[in-house]
Amino acid sequence: MNKSQDDRSRRPDGERGSGSSGKSASGNGGRSRHATATLGVVEWFRPGDHDRVDRVLDDLKTLGVQELRTCVSWADWHTPEGEAWYAWLFPQLARRVNVLPCFHYTPPSWAVAPKVCAPPRDPRAYADFLDTIVSRFGRRFEWVELWNEPNNLRHWDVTLDPYWFKFSEMVGAAAYWMKQRGKRTVLGGLNPIDPNWLRLMGDRGVLNYIDAVGVHAYGAAADSQWEGWKVTLERVGDVLRQFNQDAKVWITETGYSTWRHDEQRQLAALIDAIDAPAERVYWHAIDDLDPKLPTLDGFHCDEREYHLGIKRADGSAKLLYRIWAEGGIDAVRDAYWLSKSVHVGGEDRPVLITGGCGFIGTNTAHRILSSGRPVMVFDNLSRPGVERNLRWLRQTHGDMVRIEASDVLDAHALRSAVSQASQIFHFAAQVAVTTSLTNAIHDFEVNGRGTVNLLEAIRAQDDPPPLVFTSTNKVYGELADIRMQVNGQRYEPADDDQRQFGVSEKRPLDFHSPYGCSKGTADQYVIDYARTFGLRAVVFRMSCIYGPHQFGTEDQGWVAHFLIRAVQGQPITIYGDGMQVRDILFADDLVDAFLLAHANMDKTAGQAFNIGGGPQNTISLLELLDLIEQIHGRRPETLGGAWRPGDQRYYVSDTRKMRQMTGWSPKVGVAEGVRRLYEWLVESGTPKRVLPMKPARVRREHEERPRRKTVTTERGARRISRKEIL
């Protein structure tokens, strides 16, 4: 938007010039089919951050973003490693993106006081520094940004420079000299956005040599007096029209902190920013700040500063990154409505479903909505695919679906939702054992604290609504005391009664893995609140559930995951020997059980029920591969992996207690259910279908490929025949 193709073509071969970012309007990227600003990203790097630079550049490529604003520290330049760092950084960045270097931070030994925000003793030394950088690396960039937030005490100590006299001299000289060197200049982003301060720079002649003025703001989440981008930027524009009408207004830093677990509002903040009347917008940032590092204010003085990324500190994607990477800015814009809570009037109190956009929540909501009852979907939209489920619910049921895009860790939002509910289904959870192993605190916060938040909100009501909570069979541990035997391609208990009926609720609890501990904690809290406070609440300890609207992954939803990988023509990793057995239950049958539990709450309250397909609906991993081969016409490729912590060789639910108390029994068998899920995946385009005859790996034409399985040896993975492993 800011540069023409002719301007870009003047850059040296192999380097990017400043121009519109991203892919075409129909694809991913920083530009969209709408008339919006050129979009870039802000990331600050520390000397030695080589790996992180490469990761950020890869993320920018994934997002289709070509503009990067980053700091060039005057102070770091004068450290022993400084010159070598920037000699590596400039070409590394310029090969892949257009760089806006922000020249910042006074060397403490050169300053009037020993700190990086102090004015230099010689204001013209700043221009000399920029001249050195331009002489060595100038072909790598076109624009230069002069300082950062000069009207913010943290970045320019005005107590050492009353009325910014030294700043005006310093930046005015630098801007003049950069223009002489052929560079375009950006006046460092104002924070707060103060037109009076900018007018002061105009009165002193600084704006005569400025091509763009940067502004920084984080919207209403950071400023209670926020009036919106349009009003705020118009005031900046009024000053520029007085002193330099050719100068542009750029948003050189904006973002949204998800410290309150509201990732959907980060998405909305981005769209609001790129729709602002600014020619360029830089979004802060790709990564959350490493929690082990301090900020300018100190160590965790302001928790908001640690959650500004669109990816978490562990590298996992937040909602905005995921949607942006999958479909570009147009997909983010199309998902803008997800960030808005929707409440439609009506006398009927809705059924509240936490995690209502997930696989089980969607199937439960659909059944209830189809009966004519309104549903409030309470979901933080963090799991891949859930926005598709929510969109489908809205398209299918319209205004009967009420949306509360929030997190169960937001106790205030949860309390408000509960106050409106007639019944509650609590499905919101961290669902993966593997995730709990790498981030046990988050796992506990969501599963443990989130459930207690809900129970407290229910308990606070004059007429507490009844609750169905979904726990897990992992509360029973590895079941290592059950003696196993091999029968064909599966494990089964040697004991006849265990084999005939499965694991009952009389089984002692034995939490394994952080996930088992967090879900077990929630399980026991629900039962105890029913006992202690008289809440009408029931617990389902679920086995493996599958069915439509399930976007299964390797960590959770393994039946759907196997089918998705088969349809995609991708290999499936088998952890262990593949003879692990589970009872699997089709989603429709599970919803039947939920509704019966609610209908019989006078009998079911305070009880825990093991729920699954039962002994009549069991399957091993290897048997599922056989079934997929029958349905899909081709056996999936497999890779081998070691046994995972807490992985049960056998788990089958004894469902007699639920059957005796409510009359429930599953109706959909394994073969029928797996076929129905397969057909839904193909018909819904989830995922894109790969023809069965297409190989999953590149081979020579006409090369024979025997059916093989992979196991892991001490030297790594090797492929062996299925006959050999069995």
Image (cartoon, grey):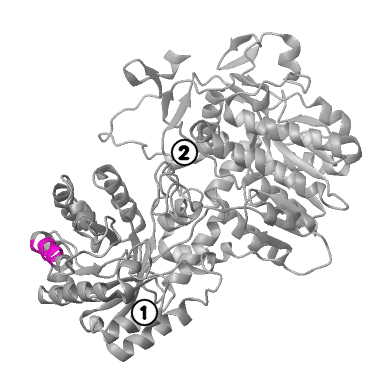
For label 2, the crowd category at 10 Å Cα-Cα, with few meaning under 14, some 14 to 19 and many 20 or more, is many
> Principal SS element in the magenta part?
helix
Q: Is residue 41 left or right of residue 622?
A: left
In the image, residue 204 sits, relative to residue 602, either above or below, namely: below
Q: Name the residue under label 2.
A: 565
- Marks 1 & 2, CB-CB < 8 Å contact: no
Q: Specify the segment rendered in magenta.
A: 128-135
Circle 1 sits in a helix, a strand or a loop, which is it? helix
Snapshot quadrant of residue 152: bottom left
Residue at 45% across, 21% down: 642
* Residue 599 shown in magenta: no
Snapshot quadrant of residue 667: top right
| Residue 396: x %, y % from top left | 67, 61
Residue at 12% across, 60% down: 137
- Mark in the foreground, 1 or 2: 1
Q: What separation in Å lies between label 1 and label 2 (alpha carbons)?
A: 58 Å
Residue at 85% across, 34% down: 531
Circle 2 sits in a helix, a strand or a loop, which is it? helix
| Residue 320: x %, y % from top left | 47, 57
Q: Which residue lies furthest to the left in this view?
A: 135
For label 1, the crowd category at 10 Å Cα-Cα, with few meaning under 14, some 14 to 19 and many 20 or more, is some
In the image, residue 123 sits, relative to residue 241, either above or below, namely: above
- Earlier in the chain: of badge 1 and badge 2, it is 1
Q: Which mark is residue 197?
A: 1
Residue at 24% across, 59% down: 106
